[in-house]
Image (cartoon, rainbow, N blue to C red):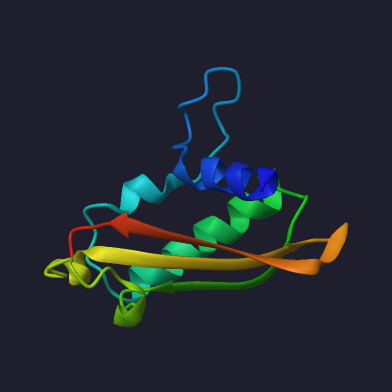
């Protein structure tokens, strides 16, 4: 759980936020006003891969999916789901090489401008 928590902190920290470590983080917030298209999804995926390679050597990535669509069956049925086109869905499947028996998954929804 600590690795998952640290990975989330890496993804949600904007470079420059940490005074003593200004290069730490992932610039996902810089994508907020960009159109939600395949180019943005590829850019976000590359940002995530590069950040993890640089800052989180404790994990081995199995799969990273960045998409503008989500399986609606996993969403809250009481949610109006009217702004789905304004969300970038990120799913990272990884393992801790020291505990390869357990596959971890982290999902994140990043609000963006839309299509």
> Quick one: which residue is furthest to the right in this view?
98
Q: Is residue 51 left or right of residue 113?
A: right
Relative to 95, say whether 19 is above or below.
Answer: above
- Where does residue 70 sit, x and y in percent of width and height? 34, 77
Q: Is residue 113 left or right of residue 105?
A: left
Q: Is residue 7 above or below residue 94?
A: above
Would residue 7 be found to the left or right of residue 111 on screen?
Answer: right
Q: How many numbered circles are shown? A: 0
Residue furthest to the top in view is 20
Residue 109: x %, y % from top left: 36, 59
Picture coordinates of residue 95, whole percent (x, y): 74, 64
| Quarter of the image where one finds residue 34 | bottom left
Image point (33%, 47%), residue name = 30
Above or below, 106 against 72 in this view is above
Depth check: 85 or 95 in front?
95
The residue shown at (28%, 74%) is 37
Left or right for 79, reference 6: left
> Residue at left 16%, top 70%?
81
The quarter in which the C terminus is drawn is bottom left
- Residue at point 68% right, 47% down? 3
The percent position of residue 84, horizontal first and vertical second, equals 21, 70
Given residues 91 and 79, the one toward you in this image is: 79
């Amino acid at each position: 759980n600590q690795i998952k928590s640290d990975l989330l902190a890496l993804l949600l920290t904007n470079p420059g936020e940490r005074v003593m470590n200004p290069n730490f983080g992932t610039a996902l917030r810089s994508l907020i006003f960009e159109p939600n298209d395949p180019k943005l999804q590829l850019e976000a995926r590359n940002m995530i891969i590069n950040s993890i390679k640089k800052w989180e050597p404790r994990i081995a990535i199995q799969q990273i999916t960045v998409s503008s669509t989500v399986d609606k069956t996993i969403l809250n049925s009481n949610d109006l789901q009217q702004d789905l086109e304004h969300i970038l869905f990120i799913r990272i499947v990884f393992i801790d090489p020291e505990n390869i028996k357990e596959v971890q998954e982290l999902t994140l929804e990043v609000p963006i401008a839309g299509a």
